[in-house]
Image (spheres, rainbow, N blue to C red):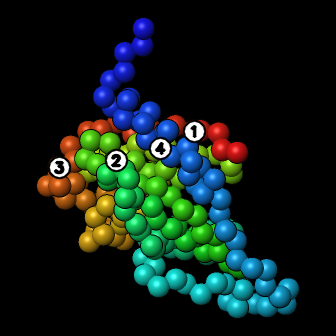
């Protein structure tokens, strides 16, 4: 007999509720194809109104900008939000829809990549690394917009004042997509 803890039961319920939305989590929209001779600046989609830029970096592949816009509360699941994630690269823009759970006992980002769904349990106020920084940037911008764009490593005191213990385990579950 399998005993379900309240947290495990909550995760199971969330997975079942999100099953219908899996296609939108793993689908990213690419902009329409640009004319081959157009410079990279002309090939970009215009940035959407309300875009909050969270991260800009330059690597060997070129410049990358990541931001969020159009955050909306889910009317049927308390503390669950949908948000559009804008990923702008040299001459391409990808827009995906992520889910973010803002509850103090089970904060989470749910995102898709390469046909898979990633459920990442977060620990607001806990350690920030290169592996979880973007998850926290997106989570803070949706759950507490007044902190959007701030370095999550410096938000420990804010997290505690908002009721997040800072001691939650961070985990990732990978679910098959299509």
Local SS, label 2: loop
Separation of disc 1 and disc 4 at Cα?
16 Å
| For the residues bearing labels 1 and 4, Cβ distance under 8 angstroms | no
Q: Nearer the viewer, residue 114 or 4?
A: 4
Q: Which image quarter: residue 176?
A: top right
> In the rendered image of this protein, does residue 28 appear above or below residue 100?
below
Local SS, label 3: loop
User: Counting other residues with Cα less than 10 Å from the Cα at mark 1, is it few (<14), some (14-19), or many (20 or more)?
Assistant: few
Q: Residue at x 25, y 47 (%)?
A: 104
Q: Residue at x 66, y 84 (%)?
A: 44
The residue pinned by badge 2 equals 107
| For the residues bearing labels 3 and 4, Cβ distance under 8 angstroms | no
Task: Residue 71: tell me if it is visible.
Answer: yes
**Residue 68 place in picture, x, y as percent:** 46, 71
Q: Nearer the viewer, mark 1 or mark 4?
A: 4
The residue pinned by badge 4 equals 17
**Residue 23 place in picture, x, y as percent:** 63, 53
Tell me which numbered mark, 3 or 2, is placed earlier along the sequence. Answer: 2
The residue pinned by badge 3 equals 163
Separation of disc 3 and disc 2 at Cα?
12 Å
Local SS, label 1: strand
Residue 160 located left or right of residue 76: left
| For the residues bearing labels 2 and 1, Cβ distance under 8 angstroms | no
The residue pinned by badge 1 equals 174
Tell me which numbered mark, 4 or 2, is placed earlier along the sequence. Answer: 4
Q: Residue at x 25, y 59 (%)?
A: 155
Residue that protrudes farthest toward the front in the picture: 76
């Amino acid at each position: 007999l399998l005993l379900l803890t309240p947290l495990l039961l909550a995760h199971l319920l969330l997975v079942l509720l999100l099953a219908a939305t899996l296609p939108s989590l793993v689908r990213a929209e690419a902009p329409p194809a640009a004319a081959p001779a157009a410079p990279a600046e002309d090939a970009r989609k215009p940035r959407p109104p309300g875009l909050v830029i969270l991260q800009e970096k330059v690597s060997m592949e070129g410049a990358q900008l990541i931001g969020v816009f159009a955050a909306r509360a889910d009317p049927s699941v308390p503390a669950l939000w949908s948000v559009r994630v804008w990923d702008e690269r040299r001459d391409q823009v990808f827009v995906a829809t992520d889910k973010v759970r803002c509850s103090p006992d089970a904060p989470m980002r749910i995102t898709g990549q390469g046909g898979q769904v990633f459920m990442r349990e977060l620990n607001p106020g806990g350690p920030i690394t290169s592996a979880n920084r973007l998850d926290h940037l997106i989570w803070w911008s949706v759950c507490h917009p007044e902190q959007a764009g701030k370095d999550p490593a410096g938000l420990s005191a804010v997290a505690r004042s908002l009721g997040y213990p800072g001691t939650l385990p961070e985990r990732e579950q990978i679910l098959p997509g299509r």
